[in-house]
Image (tube, coloured by chain):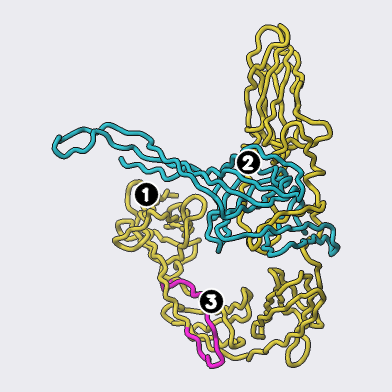
Amino acid sequence: MSTVGYYRYKAVFNSDSDVNLYINQEIVATKSVKVRPVCDEFKIIKYLNKDGQYRFFNFNRFWESRDKPREIGRANKIITSLLDTQSSSSSIGYKNDKTITVYADDVSQEELILLVDLWTSPRVYLYMGDGTTYDISDWVEVSIKSKDNLNRIKKGGYQDLFMDIILPEHYTINML
Amino acid sequence: MISSLNLIQDNKVVNSDLMAIHSPFIFLVDAIYTGEVLFIYCKIYNESDQLLNTFKCIPYKDITATQRRFMFVANSILQGEMEGFEDFAQSVGSFVPVPDITKKFKLVFSDPDDVADDLEVEIMACHGVKQFGSSPNMSEIYTNESETVTGVKGHPVYVYFYNDNASNVISLSDIYTATLIVSDSSGFVNESAVTINGETKETDTGGEVSFQLENGTWNYTIKKYGYATYNGSIVINNGNITVNVTLTELTLKTITFTLDKLGFDGVRSVVIYWNGEIVANGLTTYLGNTVDLDVYVTETYTVFGEANFCSGKADYSEENELTALDTVFNIVPYEDLPQLEFTFNVASGGVDVEDAEITSNGVSPILCYSAAILTNASGIAIVDFFFPIVGTPPIGGSWSIMNYHVTKVGYSTVTGTGEVVLSDYNPVSGKYEVTINITLIPE
């Protein structure tokens, strides 16, 4: 007995591979896994595609991050001594918006077509683990932003890709 | 007053049987009316026809003086009714079902005054990002068409397949037959329990049992009383396999089970459980406290000794391994039972009644007592005994301990149930104390 609906196979591949589905001991479907190379300190995102399936894509190590800290606000403070009081106000706290710009080299036309769903995906996650585990807790939900991506058929068929990954607001420090 | 409701925009695209809820979509309904109409309702039902929510549709624009168009923005609401669809934890190498990405809903647009006929719209909502104007279809989504999945080298990737029939046996590799033939020193062993991959089957008279398995290494366990438990593993590699297993026979030995007299006064039983089944049991004699039982060694058993609760001790139940060297096994109950005290105040017409007898179910003397229990000159009788109160009280909040009868010649018998609740416990005395007031009626 089995369940009607989708089944998901989770596996690690080091080279391009085929995965076969057997139903009642007969091959009924084959899906091909095309493996992208990686380098140290790469970035991986996971996103929900138009069919409700999670897909992965990686970017190279030449990423940039930008922090945009700003103060939340200040509150007045009662001055009890003019001799040693340094300020008449206290900081309420700070917050930081962090954005990572990632790049991918030599993205093929086929990969670009598969990535179309990324721009409008309702669930995009960035891998924040150390590479030894791939648990749910190693992923943080993010939002993405990109300039217009032109998918031009070029000689050689590859082009570069970049986009901004906006991490959730954090580092909020309240000092009151 | 609304006379009719008409659906103007249903969000269906030609040849599409799905609505991608991550696209914006708005239902437009025209109400033909007279007088004034401020809103219409939209009720959302799930596949089981359960009402999930009711909304008011807001006016969009007036088409004519008697035709007003209402709008209902559905996508964000239906997103809330769908599964969250976050990713879930899955171990590498596993092949598991995933939540369905579609859900049926029924939208019912209705007149607040319930005059016009309701307008029903059935939709199949799906997770997905196909924008309005595209034509998502179940045949496109629920498919096993060849597909290329991008993976990251050395990093887990997901590959999805679709199963359309619950009777299918699905796998990622071909299934092969693993046959185990179980024997002992004298021949085949039947009815031995073989467990592989969470499935347990028994060997037949030829000692054979078969399992359908994919490629890989599979651990198995074989159990039968009288034999040492056998643990092994088999490797399936693109072919059927037959494995011969020889079980080691254990030695049957007579063990004398001795009950500690203080805790097990009277004729009491000893029951031996192996793997959840009774394999030996016996009764001790009244004056003696031992029973000889034959069990196989070396094995682990649950030894159960039934206590006489008049001694104030609970039954004994504990797992123990009996080795080939064991000849005597002593059972000493160590758990004290809670002590109960029922105080009976017996009176008639405001006058204390002496020599009224207290019995249990009409039987005298009460269990654990050697003589009848009679009220004293103050009409008081105290009944003390032990009882295995465990856990929380049953429904009603109390334990029913004793069906008492209070009798005296010349009076009608009074019956009742002595009940105990947790709050009856007195930490000073260490007993559960209950007072029962009895009024006897002269005959």
Q: Quadrant of residue B79?
A: top right
Same chain shared by disc 1 and disc 2? no
Count how many numbered circles sit on residues in the image: 3
- Residue A3 position, x and y percent, is 75, 54
Q: Nearer the viewer, residue A6 or A34?
A: A34
| Residue A155 falls left or right of residue B53 | right
| Residue A115 falls left or right of residue B332 | right
Q: Nearer the viewer, residue B438 or B314?
A: B314
Residue contact between numbered discs 3 and 1, judged by CB atoms under 8 Å: no
Residue furthest to the front: A155
Mark 2 vs mark 3, CA separation in Å: 59 Å
Q: Quadrant of residue A32?
A: bottom right
Chain cyan in the figure, letter: A
Q: What secondary structure is marked by label 2?
A: loop
Q: Which residue is mark 1?
A: B348
Q: Vertical placement of B101 versus B282: above or below? A: above
Q: What secondary structure is marked by label 3?
A: strand
Chain yellow in the figure, letter: B
Q: Vertical placement of B43 versus B370: above or below? A: above
Q: Which residue is mark 2?
A: A122
Task: Give the amino acid at mark 1.
Answer: Ser
* Circle 2 Cα neighbour tier, 10 Å, few/some/many (<14 / 14–19 / ≥20): some
- Residue A89 position, x and y percent, is 27, 34
The subunit carrying tag 3 is B
Q: Vertical placement of B19 versus A48: above or below? A: above
- Residue B63 position, x and y percent, is 72, 11
Same chain shared by disc 3 and disc 1? yes
Mark 3 vs mark 1, CA separation in Å: 48 Å
Task: Give the amino acid at mark 2.
Answer: Pro
Q: Earlier in the sequence, mark 3 or mark 1?
A: 3
Question: The magenta stretch spans which residues?
Answer: B310-330
The subunit carrying tag 2 is A
